[in-house]
Image (cartoon, rainbow, N blue to C red):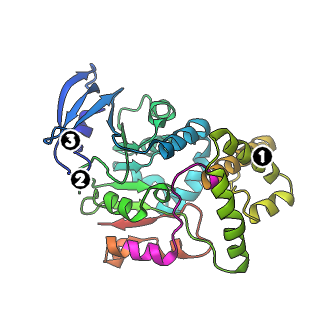
Amino acid sequence: MTPLLLSFLCEPVTKQPLQLINAVVSEEGVILSGSLISPSGRCYPIIKGIPRFVENVPRASVNSFGDEWNYFNFTDFKENWLRHTVANTFGSTSIFKDKLIVDAGGGSGAQARWFAEYGAKHVILMDLSHAVDEVVYRNLSGLKNVDIIQCSIDAPPLRDQSIEGIVYCHNVIQHTPSVEKTANALFALTAPGGEFVFNCYPLNNKGLLRWLRFNFVYIPLRAVLSRMPFLIILLYSRLVAFLRLVPILGLVIEKAGFCVMGDVPSISGESLWKNMKRRFNSASLNTFDCYGSHSFQHLKSDSEIRDLITSLQPDTDKILNVEKYFQRPTPIGCALRVIR
């Protein structure tokens, strides 16, 4: 934990300032351990350089995310991130240059690392799962301008209107107890000129075929798989991912809703074997995430998301990517940008 992070931290709910006590500091000035005390007497420990705000948090959903990212990681998907999320949301990586970026629901930490690699001034990753002690810790090791906070992103322990850069929440917000509560909590962090960037899985049930797929495949399949142990969900995801590689059959399986692979961009000079491996990994991860053991998966209609962004920012000139986000099909990885 860097001294810079300390200047942003506060008590999650009351937003009261925190006092650092019993700190152990490295020769480089990194805070390795200690405690953060609020005026009300609440104590939040710093363990392995990570401040922990995890009291009274249900563990089942949290553990499912940690298991997912510790297994899958995300570092193999950099090309997808660049060609989809970055291109369709920001245009290029140049926007990250010299920015303070909060990665809310940072998963494996891969995106936080890429933000830093593309010139971010400082990156703060927030995640609730035990992945912060495993895959996140490994992926971010060696970076001096990245901090990790273990916390719920719907009650972030950061001062309101303190982030002049980007608060980023991609493919995460639908897995929180309330999309609206989380969006409001994260937008509250942005300072004037800062922006909240997010997307939410859409409710895709318009038209007869989509309605049938949603009600007779997605709902019952998720109802069953989401209650299964990690290894069973993983077995299913890997099996259908393998079948997805079979010509014609694989396309039918995905169109029917039993598997989610999405677009996998080609890489110049890549061998057929490596391309098939990336396609398999993409289908495994996306299927697991779609039907996995997360307690919450809120699919929001276009009208619900429009109402949400209007409540956050009534000035439509300060909401970017609106037309692109609501077109169908939506460009892969496209997210809304809400500027304060």
85, above or below 282, in the image: below
- Label whose residue precedes the other's in the sequence (2 or 1): 2
Q: Secondary structure at mark 2?
A: loop
Question: For the residue carrying disc 1, how many other residues have a C-alpha within 10 Å: few (<14), some (14-19), or many (20+)?
Answer: some
Tell me, for residue 7, which label it has, or none.
Answer: 3
Mark toward the viewer: 2 or 1: 1
Tell me the kind of residue under disc 1.
Answer: Leu
Residue under circle 1?
A: 239
Is-magenta flag for residue 300? yes
**Picture residue at 77% right of the left edge, 50% below the top:** 240
Which disc number belongs to residue 186?
A: none
**Mark 1 or mark 3: whose residue is earlier in sequence:** 3
Position in image of residue 63 (x %, y %):
51, 40
Q: Which residue is mark 2?
A: 162
**Which residue is more in the foreground, 141 or 62?**
62
In terms of image quadrants, where is residue 315?
bottom left
Q: Which residues are magenta?
A: 291-309
Circle 3: element type: loop
User: Residue drawn 37% across and 59% down?
Assistant: 182
Q: Is residue 318 above or below residue 228?
A: below
